[in-house]
Amino acid sequence: MFKTSNIKSNRCVKAHAMEMLSELRGTATTTEYDRMVEAIELLTLVQHGEEDLSRKRTLSPEQLRTRLSRERARREEQRS
C-alpha cells in the first residue's frame, strides 16, 4: 500500500527524476548493505559457537544460572 506522502505529481517526477532515482538507489543500497552486515555478523556468531562447542567451552543450564546469579549479586553489592 502506498503512503500518501510518497505520491508525487507527474510534473514533480519529471522535474526531479534524477534526484529521486539517486535517493532510491541510496536507500536500496543501504538496505542491502545492512542485510549483508547482519548476515556476516550472524555467521561470525555461529562460527564462534561452533568453535566453543568443539573446544568444549560450554556451560550447562545450571552452570549458567549459577554464574548469572553470582554476577547479579556482585553488581548489586557494587551499587550498595
Image (tube, rainbow, N blue to C red):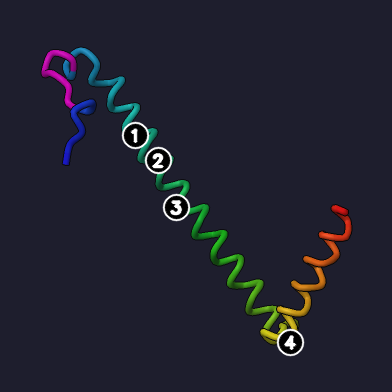
Q: Percent position (x, y) of residue 17?
A: 23, 20
Q: Percent position (x, y) of residue 44?
A: 60, 65
- Marks 1 and 3, the one that precedes in the sequence: 1
Instruction: Classify mark 1: helix, strand or loop.
Output: helix
Q: Which mark is residue 14?
A: none
Residue receiving disc 1: 25
- Within the magenta stretch, is there residue 1? no
Instruction: Classify mark 4: helix, strand or loop.
Output: loop
Residue receiving disc 3: 35
Q: Is 15 on the left-hand or right-hand side of 21? A: left
Residue range in magenta is 7-12
Instruction: Classify mark 3: helix, strand or loop.
Output: helix
- Marks 3 and 2, the one that precedes in the sequence: 2
Q: Is 29 on the left-hand or right-hand side of 65? A: left
User: Pointer 1: residues within 10 angstroms few (<14), some, or many (20+)?
Assistant: few
- Marks 4 and 2, the one that precedes in the sequence: 2
Badge nearest the viewer, 4 or 1: 4
Residue receiving disc 2: 29
